[in-house]
Amino acid sequence: MLEIKKVEKDGIGSEIGLRPKDKIVAFDGFSVVDILDYEYYDAQEFFILTVLRDGEEFEFEIEKDFDETLGLEFVSDNLELKTCRNNCVFCFIDQMPKGMRDTLYIKDDDYRQSFLCGNYVTLTNVTDDDIERIIRLNLSPLYVSVHATDENVRKTLLNNRFAGKVNEYLKRLNDGGVLIHTQVVLVKGLNDGEILDKTMKDLSSLENVLSLAVVPCGITEHRDGLYPIEDIDEEYSKKVIKQIDNFNKKLGRNLVLCADEFYIRAKIEMQNTDFYGEFDQLENGVGGIRLFEKEFDEVCEKRCYRRTFLVVTGVSAKNFIEKFAKKTEELVEGLKVFILGAENLFFGKTVTCAGLLTGQDILNAINSFSGEFDELLISSVMLKNGEPLFIDGKTLKDISKEIKKPIRVVENDGASFFNSLSSDNYYLLVEGGD
């Protein structure tokens, strides 16, 4: 149930006499679980509202225009995070060193956060009632970590004997009109090859599955006692890309999308921009390079900006960033840009993305650089959302104080990259310096 904290004067709730401390217990006879029930029914024109007041229940028949609202604010949204019940062989959290912020070790697996924020969920902790609720409230799209449609393989991957129900749940969601984006974290020797073929085929048979991202398993140096996983190389990456290309060609549409990392490892050109459609799998590392290029090309122009930057990024992105830094230098008179690909000594050299670089990794890279520069430029993906804090606890202020230079933080897109290197006005913040 949801306890009312405040009732807006001009809302429907005020008109029917609702007041603080009343509790919303049901809509159309369905018990209220959390704020999503309210958000759904508040957008409907007709429904029955059940309210508990002083131990007595009251029913109200609500008839309103779709753009009218009950106007209620609640004590709590009841969206306490549901956590993961799996013990996946590839779980990145299990590979993290100890001693970091507590929140970094939380394993979320909440279908509501999947709908609200695009988080991937395994559906191993949902009930039949949850599936029915998702369909009834049209919590769409959802983002589902499938990994394998072969039930036994999925049970092995997730270390969960209930993991095989994913096919049943996906079919029910599909038949209920819920749109679904899916992913496979590819583990060499477990869910690749013929198992991946089966997964792609099974998911392609569901009309409301909009995409399937195939991403490489992240491997750190902190895997003592964990399932042995082999890192991918150039030959393996080429094989995976070819397998997926052949499947899409046979299917007649681009359902399955390889993570950019596979193309980087394979040392081959990515698909063109149109291949990625609306870039629905961008947060999964799919299509980001092509989108960056598109954004860059839309804003780049001749300018004059006399400044020297040092840009620190991940090892995998170094060559790519270097390419666009050079293009920017050619267009902007007086600009000089140096690029460093920082090795990740915190998680291990197998982790090459910029988003997992620590403050100390950045310092290590800068200490190896002998040139002169005016400002350090880094991507916002290295920092905690909304805070100047790196994953190892170091702050922007810590880094700036040590290098005695200001740090410019920019959004992780092509337009911001060009604009931040050619103007004083396009960055999130500048920290420190002498």
Image: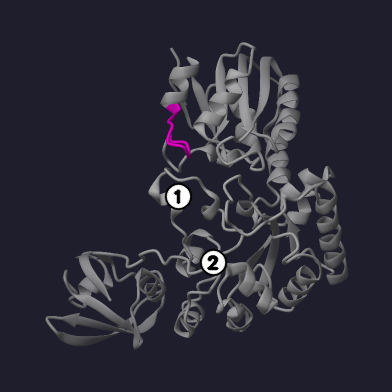
Q: Is residue 66 magenta?
A: no
User: Residue 273: where, in percent of width, then height?
Assistant: 76, 49
Q: Amino acid at mark 2?
A: Val
- Label 1 or label 2, whichever comes before in sequence order: 1
Q: Amino acid at mark 1?
A: Leu
Q: Cβ–Cβ below 8 Å for labels 1 and 2?
A: no
**How much space separates mark 1 and mark 2, taking CA atoms?**
17 Å
> What residue sits 27% from the left and 81% below the top?
25
> What residue sits 46% from the left and 21% below the top?
400
> What residue sits 66% from the left and 26% below the top?
340
Which residue position holds label 2? 121
Q: Nearer the viewer, residue 246 or 420?
A: 246
In the picture shown, does residue 152 fall above or below 94? below
User: Residue 96: where, in percent of width, then height?
Assistant: 52, 48
Q: Is residue 422 in sight in this rendering?
A: no
Which residue position holds label 1? 104
Q: How many marks?
A: 2
User: Residue 301: where, in percent of width, then height?
Assistant: 71, 26
Secondary structure mainly formed by the magenta segment? loop
Q: Nearer the viewer, residue 47 or 434?
A: 434
Magenta extent: 388-396
